[in-house]
Image (cartoon, rainbow, N blue to C red):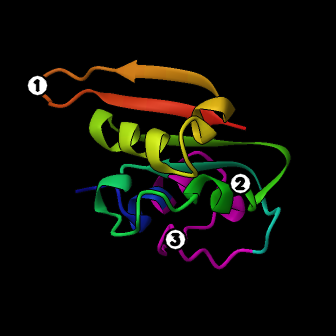
């Protein structure tokens, strides 16, 4: 599809940041990074594929990998993101943390995508 690890590394080289770029592929439910590793994390179009119980507090798990003051961005279809916002950690748990929410309609695609920022 042109958006894999090699394409990312090629883009980093063109931008002059190859030395500072790492690409890792792993399950979003089994991260192998030390806690408090990142200022920013993105979870991109994977919620639809998760087999975990929707009540599992995934946002709490992901937030452990952020440094103090860091931000988590979750991007997915409306249906998957609504499932995540309602189910992860109980009613309102994620929505209380969600400080920005965007709707990104794309031409010729269905459904619309949502993007949320959680801190």
Locate residue 38, reporting x and y percent: 76, 56
Magenta-colored segment: predominant secondary structure = loop
Label 1–label 3 contact, CB within 8 A: no
Question: Does 115 sit left or right of 119 as displayed?
Answer: left
Mark number displayed over residue 63: 2
Q: Residue furthest right?
A: 68
Asked if residue 39 is positioned above or below residue 92 in the image, the reply reads below
Kindly identify which residue carries mark 3.
29
SS at badge 1: loop
Span highlighted in magenta in the image = 9-33
Q: 100 left or right of 78?
A: right
Residue at screen point 72% across, 60% down: 20
User: Which quarter of the figure has residue 22?
Assistant: bottom right
Expressed as whole percent of the image width and height from the top left, the position of residue 101 reads 52, 23
Residue 79 inside the magenta-drawn segment: no
Residue 30 position, x and y percent, is 55, 77
Mark 1, other Cα within 10 Å: few <14 / some 14–19 / many ≥20:
few
Q: Is residue 16 above or below residue 53?
A: above
Identify the mark nearer the N-term, 2 or 1. 2
The image's mark for residue 108 is 1
Work out which quarter of the rendered image holds the N terminus and state it.
bottom left
**The C terminus is located in which quarter?**
top right
Between the residue at mark 2 and the residue at mark 3, the CA separation in whole angstroms equals 12 Å
Q: Tell me where residue 110 appears, x and y as whole percent.
A: 15, 31
């Amino acid at each position: 599809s042109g958006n894999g690890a090699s394409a990312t590394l090629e883009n980093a080289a063109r931008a002059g940041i190859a030395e500072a770029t790492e690409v890792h592929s792993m399950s979003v439910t089994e991260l192998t990074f030390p806690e408090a590793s990142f200022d920013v994390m993105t979870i991109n179009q994977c919620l639809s594929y998760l087999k975990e119980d929707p009540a599992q507090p995934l946002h709490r798990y992901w937030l452990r990998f952020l440094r103090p003051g860091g931000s988590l961005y979750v991007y997915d279809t409306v249906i998957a993101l609504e499932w995540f916002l309602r189910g992860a950690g109980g009613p309102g748990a994620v929505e209380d943390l969600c400080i920005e929410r965007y709707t990104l309609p794309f031409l010729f695609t269905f459904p619309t995508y949502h993007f949320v920022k959680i801190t």
